[in-house]
Amino acid sequence: MPKNSNNSDSGKGLEVTDFWKVIGSSPVRDASEIDSALERISRQLSAMTPTALTRFVERLRESLYRIDRRDLAEVPVMLAGGLKFPQTSDHFLYARCACILAGKEVYGDVLSSGVGFDRFVAPFAQEAEGLLYLASEQYERATGSKMDVESDFSIESMSNLQGWAD
């Protein structure tokens, strides 16, 4: 279990409430809504300090980690005509990003029960991958150097051992 798993890290990190204020919420019903959400978040991140951008990424990684669970990864991708196939690890990562873009309430529902995650595995939701890069792009614009984040939370699929336990 990661060592900084509580909602506050003694003032050193972006507070959870601040993270969700930046994320806001989006219906995430199609690619245009995802693009709009990403643009809105990017504008907010552009006003943040490099330290706050790093903290945003830390909170994002923690949020992605928490919903890295077998039950969510096993939700199949449904295509037109009833064709379905399993998510790849990248597809699952981007589906988790889409879930976060939907906002704190939807994310909390998925985290507590898994209910509603199926809409994030739709092919259009892969556009949410952009969430992974917004803060680091803003950081590089502000500082001229690449962001270096040391995190206790891996975003790779199957890294949350509790979420993948049988």
Image: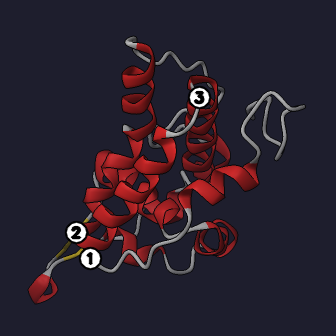
What type is the residue that disc 3 sits on?
Thr
The type of residue carrying mark 1 is: Asp
Marks 1 and 2 in Cβ contact (< 8 Å): yes
The mark nearer the N terminus, 3 or 1, is 1
Please tell me whether residue 160 is drawn above or below residue 127 in the rendered image.
above
Residue at point 57%, 36% (across, down): 48
Residue 49: % across, % down: 59, 28
> Do tag 3 and tag 1 residues touch (Cβ < 8 Å)?
no
Left or right of 83: which side holds 44? right
**Helix, strand or loop for disc 1:** loop
Of the numbered discs 1 and 2, the one sitting upstream in the chain is 1
Q: Which residue is mark 2?
A: 124
Report x, y in % for residue 65.
Answer: 58, 44
Residue neighbourhood size for the residue with mark 2, other residues' Cα within 10 Å, grouped as few (<14), some (14–19), many (≥20):
some
| Residue 45 located left or right of residue 14 | left
Residue 30: which disc? 1
Q: Which mark is residue 49?
A: 3
Residue at the top extreme of this rendering = 145
Identify the residue at image location x=73%, y=32%: 2
Residue 115, by quadrant, is bottom right
Outermost residue toward the left in this view = 81
- Image depth: mark 1 or mark 2 in front: 1
The answer for how far apart the CA atoms under marks 1 and 2 are is: 6 Å
